[in-house]
């Protein structure tokens, strides 16, 4: 049990399971809230207990549908109007983060719009994990505590005691993340270069580096359709790798992603419980991030440093 402090933890509907685990780690009860639903699909969240003068932490990943983001916005607004002292949004997976720039003409920057909406709702702080792009932190005008999945993935990899370990990124965008793992694990590193002509479809991929006779771990922030991940695994295996494991913080796993993973040369896919999903694969292992979020929430509440939560 952590030290007591004037705070309350609530959850929106999409992250209830993770929020319950965080509350358990903190040694507190999850706050009481409810949602009224109207026949046309409109909904209205409400706090069923007083939050006046409290530090209010609201847990919700903002993966699609957009109702998940909007429910969080309504909860933040309700807390501010109920005279909460501070409102902290705990967003394990920050959705719409792939829209972090204008990569072609006449498109929105969804990650910036989401941050503006959270700011307008009245959020005082954001706690999140493995943003798709680190610079998204700069979209906010409030403090952002950006946690990393390496806090649980790195020890897991070390405990595997793999010989001839090589770390890989599934694309050039993940090279910084893979390099950090490589330095920490004192391993070799390879990169995958992909040519993508439209979202979720990879046209070509090549491997930069040697993988023959090596045990490869592929590191990424999220796995959506698993198309890039599986193609990278296939290319790496064709180059003579012994085993392939993949680590992705956010298991979006849309469409036929799980079937692709089951049919791939990936021996194991390790993810977190940042996003709820139905695990239908023996290859997928879920590690909980409840403890690291509980430690961070308590540190924020007590104005303590959170740097001890980082492995590298």
Image (cartoon, rainbow, N blue to C red):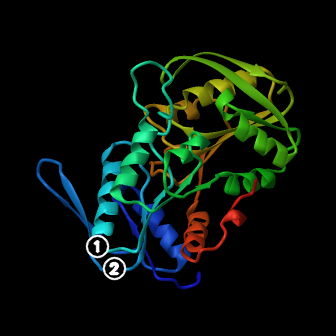
Residue 135 drawn above or below residue 214: below
Q: Nearer the viewer, residue 283 or 189?
A: 189
Residue 300 in picture, x, y percent from top left: 56, 70
Q: Mark 2: which secondary structure?
A: loop
Residue 31 drawn above or below residue 266: below
Q: Quadrant of residue 296?
A: bottom right
Q: Earlier in the sequence, mark 2 or mark 1?
A: 2
Residue 274 in picture, x, y percent from top left: 51, 53
In the rendered image, the quadrant that contains the N terminus is: bottom right
Residue 175 drawn above or below residue 147: above
Checking the image for residue 300, the label placed there is: none
Question: Residue at the location (70% across, 41% down)?
Answer: 177
Left or right of residue 294: residue 96: left
Left or right of residue 98: residue 248: right
How busy is the neighbourhood of tag 1: few (under 14 within 10 Å), some, or many (20 plus)? Answer: some
Q: Residue furthest bottom?
A: 4
Q: Nearer the viewer, residue 172 or 276?
A: 172
Residue 256 in picture, x, y percent from top left: 46, 31
Residue 2 in picture, x, y percent from top left: 59, 81
**Can you see residue 63?**
no
Q: Badge 1 is on which residue?
A: 82
Q: Badge 2 is on which residue?
A: 52
How busy is the neighbourhood of tag 2: few (under 14 within 10 Å), some, or many (20 plus)? Answer: some
Q: Mark 1: which secondary structure?
A: loop
Left or right of residue 184: residue 13: left
Q: Residue furthest left?
A: 39
Q: Nearer the viewer, residue 88 or 191?
A: 88
Q: Nearer the viewer, residue 54 or 175?
A: 54
Q: Are marks 2 and 1 in contact (CB under 8 Å)?
A: yes
**Can you see residue 270?**
yes
Query: What is the total number of numbered labels drawn onto the structure image?
Result: 2
Question: Residue at the location (48% across, 41% down)?
Answer: 252
């Amino acid at each position: 049990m952590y030290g007591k402090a004037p705070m309350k933890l609530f959850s929106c509907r999409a992250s209830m399971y993770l929020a319950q685990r965080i509350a358990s780690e903190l040694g507190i009860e999850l706050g009481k809230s409810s949602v009224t639903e109207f026949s046309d699909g409109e909904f209205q969240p409400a706090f069923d207990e007083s939050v006046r003068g409290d530090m209010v932490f609201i847990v919700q990943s903002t993966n699609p549908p957009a109702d998940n983001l909007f429910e969080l916005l309504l909860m933040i607004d309700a807390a501010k109007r109920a005279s909460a002292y501070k409102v902290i949004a705990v967003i394990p997976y920050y959705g719409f983060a792939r829209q972090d720039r204008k990569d072609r003409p006449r498109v929105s920057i969804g990650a910036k719009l989401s941050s503006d909406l959270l700011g307008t709702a009245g959020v005082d702080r954001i706690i999140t994990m493995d943003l798709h792009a680190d610079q998204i932190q700069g979209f906010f005008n409030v403090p952002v505590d950006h946690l990393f999945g390496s806090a649980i993935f790195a020890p897991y990899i070390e405990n595997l005691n793999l010989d001839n370990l090589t770390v890989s990124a599934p694309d050039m965008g993940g090279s910084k993340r893979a390099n950090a793992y490589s330095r920490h694990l004192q391993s070799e590193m390879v990169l995958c270069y992909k040519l993508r002509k439209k979202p979720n479809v990879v046209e070509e991929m090549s491997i930069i580096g040697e993988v023959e006779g090596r045990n490869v771990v592929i590191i990424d922030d999220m796995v959506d359709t698993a198309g890039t991940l599986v193609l990278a695994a296939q290319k790496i295996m064709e180059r003579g790798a012994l085993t392939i494991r993949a680590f992705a913080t956010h298991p979006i796993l849309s469409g036929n992603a799980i079937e692709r993973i089951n049919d791939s040369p990936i021996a194991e896919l390790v993810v977190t419980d940042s996003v709820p999903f139905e695990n239908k694969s023996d290859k997928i292992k879920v590690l909980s991030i409840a403890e690291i979020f509980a430690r961070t929430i308590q540190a924020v509440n007590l104005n303590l440093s959170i740097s001890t939560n980082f492995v590298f």
